[in-house]
């Protein structure tokens, strides 16, 4: 039977993500935004911070600076009190200011629709770029955060702790139209069930999970073949 680069049958990979979809029908970014610019700024602020905390500060931030041109005109020191609750506020204020000025200088104030252009902006890495591409611009992207890394490695979908390599491996497993949704469900699964101390008894992926198989070698398991 053909296998993916992860050593899993393609039908099993499809089944795993179908079950993740079923377990987490509400999976989506939890950041509140109205425009690509707002999502870009919010995602920068979300580093080492909860989405809920980011959502508590962005209304005031966007009321004062509703677009890239307004934000570019601000001094980073003026942004610090607004973003302080998100942590690392001086660094984030500088990143927001630099990002906005680059948007104005290089993209007429608009958020560019390519990975290459996004990661060239101050404060923007691949994860942030993929969030914006997938959620605000309708372009397939697969953000990889700590939850995605933990869950994908435990299941056996990837075998790396490097986010860039994990992104490439996961993208190779799925058609592009599933990338963003796959990331959303992996993230929510990591927050709700596959936590650092996982709630395996609540997980529908148990029969096909490498972590669970190693944890409970005597537990009855289905063979790792595809199933619908």
Image: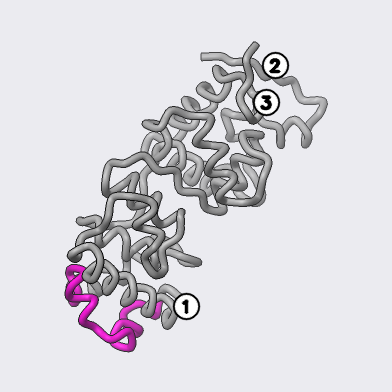
* Mark nearer the N terminus (1 vs 2): 1
- Between the C-alphas of marks 1 and 3, the distance is 40 Å
Where residue 164 appears, x then y in whole percent?
A: 55, 49
Residue 10 in sight: yes
Task: Give the residue displayed 70% in from the left and 16% down from the top.
Answer: 223
Residue 59 in sight: no
- Between the C-alphas of marks 2 and 3, the distance is 13 Å
In the rendered image, which residue does mark 1 sit on? 88
In reply to whether residue 73 is colored magenta, the answer given is yes
Circles 2 and 3: CB atoms closer than 8 Å: no
Q: Please give left or right for residue 92 compared with residue 227 in the image.
A: left
Where residue 191 appears, x then y in whole percent?
A: 52, 49
Task: Give the residue displayed 36% in from the left and 49% down from the top.
Answer: 29
Where residue 1 appears, x then y in whole percent?
A: 65, 11
In the rendered image, which residue does mark 3 sit on? 7
In the rendered image, which residue does mark 2 sit on? 223
In the displayed orientation, state which residue is furthest to the front.
Answer: 106
Task: Give the residue displayed 56% in from the left and 14% down from the top.
Answer: 227
The magenta stretch is 63-85
């Amino acid at each position: 039977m053909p296998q993916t680069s992860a050593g899993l049958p393609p039908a099993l990979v499809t089944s795993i993500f179908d079950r993740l979809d079923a377990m987490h029908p509400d999976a989506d970014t939890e950041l509140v935004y109205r425009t690509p610019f707002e999502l870009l700024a919010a995602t920068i602020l979300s580093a080492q911070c909860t989405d809920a905390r980011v959502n508590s500060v962005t209304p005031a931030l966007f009321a004062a600076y509703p677009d890239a041109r307004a934000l570019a005109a601000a001094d980073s020191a003026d942004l610090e009190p607004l973003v302080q609750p998100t942590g690392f506020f001086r660094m984030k204020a500088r990143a927001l200011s630099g990002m906005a000025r680059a948007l104005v200088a290089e993209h007429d104030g608009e958020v560019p629709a390519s990975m290459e252009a996004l990661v060239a902006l101050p404060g923007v890495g691949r994860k942030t770029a993929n969030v914006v591409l997938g959620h605000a611009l309708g372009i397939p992207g697969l953000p990889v955060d700590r939850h995605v890394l933990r869950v994908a490695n435990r299941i056996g979908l990837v075998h790396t702790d490097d986010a860039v390599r994990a992104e490439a491996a996961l993208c190779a497993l799925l058609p592009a139209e599933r990338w963003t949704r796959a990331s959303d469900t992996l993230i929510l699964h990591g927050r709700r069930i596959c936590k650092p101390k996982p709630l395996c008894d609540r997980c529908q992926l148990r029969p096909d999970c490498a972590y669970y198989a190693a944890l409970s070698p005597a537990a009855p398991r289905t063979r790792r073949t595809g199933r619908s």
